[in-house]
Amino acid sequence: MASISSSSRPLWAAFNTLSGFIAPSPASEFAFIPGNTPMSTFKQTAIAMVAYYIVILGGRELMRNRPAFKLNTLFMAHNLGLTIISGGLLTLFLEQLVPTLWERGVYHSVCYKEAGWTQPLVMLYYLNYLTKYLEFVDTCFLVLRKKPLTFLHTYHHGATALLCYVQLSGETPVSWVPIVLNISVHCLMYWYYFQAARGVKIWWKQYITIMQIVQFVIDLGFVYYLSYSILVLKYLPFLPARERCDGSDMGAFSGVAILTSYLFLFIGFYFATYKKSGKSANRISSAVGAANMRHVSDASRSAVGTLKRVNKKFASTIMTDKA
């Protein structure tokens, strides 16, 4: 099978050159080495997560009796920055993956390390992992602007950083599926927040949540099947499965558990936010309609009463004239 030359990936070549000026070494020399690469151990990830929850929960208490900060310019810059980062990562991922998918197919790309765990992809997986810590700032803005902290938001941010770490340390080739879908949604989501902060009215906010739900459904279709393959090949070889699927037990279990929880939480959020709003609007409409009917009924009774009085007075006048 013919290999794909580096010249067919010009964006990666440009990124590699640029990274050589910014980082100590170019992207092509990166290797994820636990204990050596920054934020590459469970201890470091756990400390970052604990610090995140201490800061946001402690910050919420500190802000309880203080006025909210506006921070609109910083908020716009943060969201625009994450839009650009997500778009850049998405482009680099697609440049790596599309030729591989075309040449080797989906199963090979999600189950074989030589397709789904190449050096450029590991570099991109790591960069995506680091952005999860940058996204912690989302919650800091909520705290400082005194916006509600939901369980979904706070749990999702911490758990996603943990999930990315586990998949990196477990060398899971299917990682690109949830990552590519996630950053695709993030391009739109952070663009929405940027535009909303500018005061632009966006009508498609609801569809971002729908896209997130669809994302998790697709994720789980891959993750369930591949986790089954990994575990069956290792522990239950008498059951039907493909001949090979690379990945770790921890990667399989954590992917299934966390992504499944996301699906249920986002579905709950969708119905609580948008369907509830629709029901409220219907109740308001019904109440307004009922009030209008009462006004019409009252006006009708008043008009009938007036006509009766006029008719009675007119009849009395006629009788007087006849007399």
Image: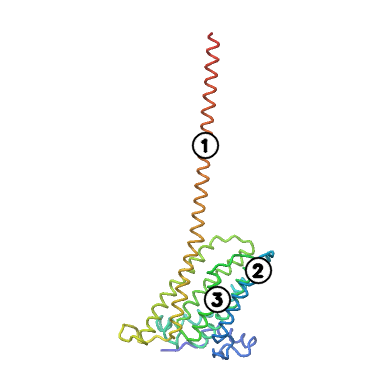
User: Badge 1 is on which residue?
Assistant: 296
> What's under tag 1, amino acid-wise?
Val
Q: Residues within 10 Å of mark 3 (few under 14, many from 20)?
A: many
- Report the Cα–Cα distance between label 2 and label 1: 49 Å
Q: Is residue 113 above or below residue 278?
A: below
**Residue contact between numbered discs 2 and 3, judged by CB atoms under 8 Å:** no
Quarter-wise, where is residue 59 in the image? bottom right
Task: State which tag comes first along the sequence, 1 or 3.
Answer: 3
Q: On residue 311, which mark appears?
A: none
Q: Is residue 60 above or below residue 106?
A: above
Q: Nearer the viewer, residue 21 or 73?
A: 73
Q: Nearer the viewer, residue 212 or 2?
A: 212
Q: Nearer the viewer, residue 280 or 213?
A: 280
Task: State which tag comes first along the sequence, 2 or 3.
Answer: 2
User: Badge 2 is on which residue?
Assistant: 144
User: Badge 3 is on which residue?
Assistant: 158
Q: Residue at x 50, y 61 (%)?
A: 272
Q: Is residue 306 above or below residue 272?
A: above
Quarter of the C terminus within the rendering: top right
> What's under tag 3, amino acid-wise?
Gly
Q: Residue at x 61, y 90 (%)?
A: 25
1 or 3: mark nearer the eye:
3
**Residue contact between numbered discs 2 and 1, judged by CB atoms under 8 Å:** no
> What's under tag 2, amino acid-wise?
Leu
Q: Secondary structure at mark 3?
A: helix
Q: Secondary structure at mark 1?
A: helix
- Report the Cα–Cα distance between label 1 and label 3: 56 Å
Q: Nearer the viewer, residue 125 or 20?
A: 125
Q: Position of residue 307 (x, y in %)?
A: 53, 25
